[in-house]
Image (cartoon, grey):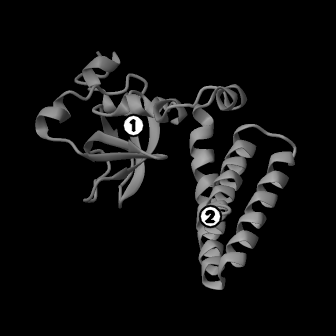
Amino acid sequence: MSGLDPVFWAVVLMFVGCGLVVLEVLIPSGGALSLLSAVALIASLVTAFRSDFSTGLTFVLITLVAVPSAVAMAFKVWPMTPMGKAFLGELSTSAEMTPEDPRRELVGRAGVAKSHMLPSGAVLIDGKTIDAISQGSAINKGQAVVVVEVRANRVVVRAADTDEARQIVADPRDIFSQPIDELGFESFDDPLA
């Protein structure tokens, strides 16, 4: 046995080439490691073809699968390395990435439909007019509604039950929603008296 099998050297050079590709992703070298990786992968293919033509074709297929897999694995691991953390900073959680929407506080609040909702329209909640859509059925103007959810840029409401409708407080600025006794008018019984 004068030397090791050429297939052994082809496998070693393949691992060296894939390792250098991973190092290039993890430690940027301006292309020097990529060049060495390409040399190692080409040497692996040449050595495999010197052994046998079918072995060479097998190594070509292995190279076409192994190199992209190694690069993908390196990019998956890179954010967890010290250099990746320094470059990217702390990764944001999904809760941090969702924008704050003040309309989310409206969920569960009751209001009044200011227009017919077929399925969209305007509702009055806490003295503010808000564009909304009904959850399913049409809602008539003046009917009590409850905010069910805030989905993307839409406020979704449903018709309120009788108990929920009692909780709605009329807007003090809207004089038409207040009883006439509270407006401060005198009795109209004897206008000349």
**In the depicted structure, whether residue 127 falls above or below residue 57:** above
Quarter of the image for residue 63 reads bottom right
**In the depicted structure, whether residue 190 falls above or below residue 28:** above
In this orientation, which residue lies closer to the viewer: 25 or 170? 25
Q: Quadrant of the C terminus?
A: top left
Closer mark to the observer between disc 2 and disc 1 = 2
The numbered disc on residue 124 is: 1
Q: What number of labels is visible?
A: 2
Q: Residues within 10 Å of mark 2 (few under 14, many from 20)?
A: few
Label 2 and label 1: CA atoms lie apart by 91 Å
Q: Quadrant of the N terminus?
A: bottom right
Q: Disc 2 on helix, strand or loop?
A: loop
- Residue at (66, 74) in percent of width and height: 60
x, y percent for residue 15: 63, 54
Residue 185 visible here: no
Residue 138 visible here: yes
Quarter of the image for residue 103 reads top left
x, y percent for residue 26: 70, 39
- Residue at (76, 58) in percent of width and height: 40
Q: Residues within 10 Å of mark 1 (few under 14, many from 20)?
A: many
In this orientation, which residue lies closer to the viewer: 26 or 86? 26
Is 162 placed left or right of 169 in the picture?
left
Q: Which mark sits nearer the N-terminus, 2 or 1?
A: 2
* Callout 1 amino acid: Leu
Is 24 placed left or right of 130 in the picture?
right
Residue with the mark numbered 2: 1
| Residue closest to the far left | 163
Is 42 placed left or right of 140 in the picture?
right
* Callout 2 amino acid: Met
The numbered disc on residue 68 is: none
In this orientation, which residue lies closer to the viewer: 1 or 130? 1
x, y percent for residue 152: 47, 47
